[in-house]
Structures are given as C-alpha cells and as structure tokens.
Image: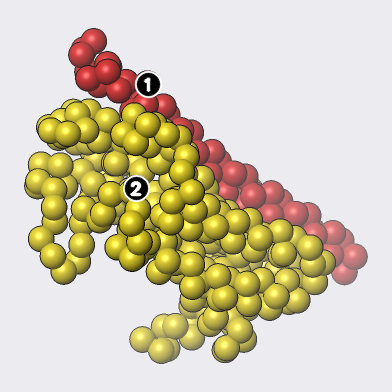
Chain colours: A red, B yellow
Amino acid sequence: MKEFLSMSGYGAYVWSCYGITALVLIGNFWSARRDRDQALLHAKRRAQARQGEDA
Amino acid sequence: MWLWFHKLSSPPYAYRTAGRLRPWFLWPAVIAMLIATYGGLVMAPADYQQKDAFRIIYVHAPSAILSLMVYTSMAIAAAVGVIWRIKLAHAVAAACAPVGAWFTVITLLTGSIYGKPMWGTWWEWDPRLTSELILLFLYLGYMALRASFDDTQRADRASAILAIVGVVNVPIVKYSVVWWNSLHQGPSISKFAKPSIDASMLWPLLLMLVAFILYFLAILCDRVRAEILKRERDARWLSETVVGAQP
C-alpha cells in the first residue's frame, strides 16, 4: 500500500493530478446542475406570475 | 435523419430529449471513469522510462483530447447557428464553452505537474503548450464576449464568429508535436498507425476517453437545458412544462 501511494517516488505529482481532475470534474457537474435548477426556478416564477396576471 | 434533425432543433423537443438522455450519459461515465482509474493506477504496469509518473497520462491526455473536441463541437454548433439561423445551435455552442474551458485548465495544470519531473520544468514556451494556452484564452474570450451583450441574438452572432475563427488553433494544437520540434512527446494513439503503447496501458486510456466524452455529454444536457430555459422564458410551451415541475 505504501509502495502504491509513493508511485515510485512520483506520488506527489501523480496524486495531485488525479486530485485536480476529480475536483474540476465534480465542480463542473455541480455548477451545470445549479445553473439548470436556477434557470428552472426563474422560469417557473415567471410563468406563475403571468398566470396570476391572467386570472 | 433530416426529419430527426429538424425535430431536435425545436426547443421543447430538445429540452425534453436532453433531460431524458442525461442519466444515460452520466452513469456510464461515472462507472467507466472508476474502472479506467483502477486500470490506470493499479492494473497498468509502470513505464520503463517514466516509471509510475506516466500514470498522469490517464487524466492528462483525455482532458487534452476533450479540450479540442469540445472546441470543435462549439465551433460547428456556432457555424450551424449562423448559417441556418437555428437558435438551438447557438444554445449548444454557448453550453459547450465552460466545460471546454475547464478541460483546458485540467490539461494545462496536469501537464505542468507532469512536466516538472519529466522535463525538469513546470512551463516552457513550447508550441504544444503555448497553443493549448491560446485555446484557453479563446474559450475565455468567447465567454467574455457573450457576457458583454445584453441581447442574446447579438451575443450569439458575435461569439459565433470568434468561435469559428478560433478553430484554426485546433489543428495547430493537435499537430504542433509533429510540425515543430517540441519538448512534448508525440502521439501515443493514432487512428491510422499501430499505437506506440502496450495494450495493458492502452485500454484504461481509451476507456477514460470514452468516460470523458460521456461526462461531457451529460454536462452538456444540463447546460443546454439551462440555456433553453433562459432563451424561451416567454414561450407558452415553457410555462406549461415548467409549472408543476420540481426544480
């Protein structure tokens, strides 16, 4: 296990690369989802407000 | 085919389709990423020259390929939007930009960390590295240009021109290692020639590439939906779809 983590001495380089990639991929996923949900919420409020006017 | 294309360019249909497709891209992407990570970190043997540092390639190369692929998709979508005046194509182009920019950031950062032990430097003004940096500026310029317009249609047209002109940089990045003397290593996988790496090292790389493509498509579904919601906010179909839908 120790050997695996040390990556023949390149551990710091290898793990930081995998860490950065994982972080960016997860961050991207959340921000895309948040944007979608916010847009949906705005659209919903707008539609409801318009329905209120019509009534 | 054309009928399908025509149907897909209608916002309500595209909105629903993107929502339906998303899980089919997302879950295979997650599973493939986990398997490819295991394959790359544990199962593949260490390189005879680069030892275990070569394992960085499994995140670096797929990100680099995606950074170019996403830009090309963005430029094609922008061109379709300009030529056939399809609003949805502009929405797709706009949705590509942030994902592509982040792939470029991963490429540059992991490349820099890869370069330190292999070349003895974090950065070099080398053709491959410099052209990839220009790619990042193109993405950022595209997004900044879009953000500078209040009117979506004008933003679409202006940013489309930038995306289309910037596409010349894509072959420059791709072939920079072949055209010029570069510090960067040559391609390991090629469509036409036998790959220059062993099968045990190759399969996690290809699987990771597939995973990244699926991941991109899943993110694209969300971003395209957000774009459609913003653009079609006064359309009747939208209010009918949206009211009652859980955010």
Do marks 1 and 2 share a subunit? no
Residue B67 makes an appearance in the image: no
Mark 1: amino acid: Ala
Q: Position of residue B25 (x, y in %)?
A: 37, 54
The residue where tag 1 is placed is A12
Which is more foreground, mark 1 or mark 2? 2
Q: Residue at x 79, y 67 (%)?
A: B149
**Which residue of the protein is positioned furthest toward the top in this rendering?**
A2
Query: Circle 2 marks a residue in which chain?
Result: B
Mark 1 and mark 2: Cα distance apart in space:
22 Å
Identify the residue shown where x is 13% and y is 48%.
B197
Amino acid on which disc 2 is placed: Leu
Mark 2, secondary structure of its residue: loop
In depth, the one of B247 and B81 nearer the eye is B81
- Report which quarter residue B242 is drawn in: bottom right
Q: Residue B201 in the image: x percent, y percent?
A: 15, 42
Where on the picture, by quarter, is residue B235? bottom right
Q: Nearer the viewer, residue B218 or B243?
A: B218
Q: Which residue is mark 2?
A: B183
Relative to residue A43, is residue B37 depicted above or below? above
User: How many numbered discs, if any?
Assistant: 2
- Secondary structure of the residue carrying numbered label 1: helix
In the image as oriented, which residue stretches furthest toward the front?
B181
Subunit under mark 1? A
What residue is drawn where x is 34% and y is 41%?
B59
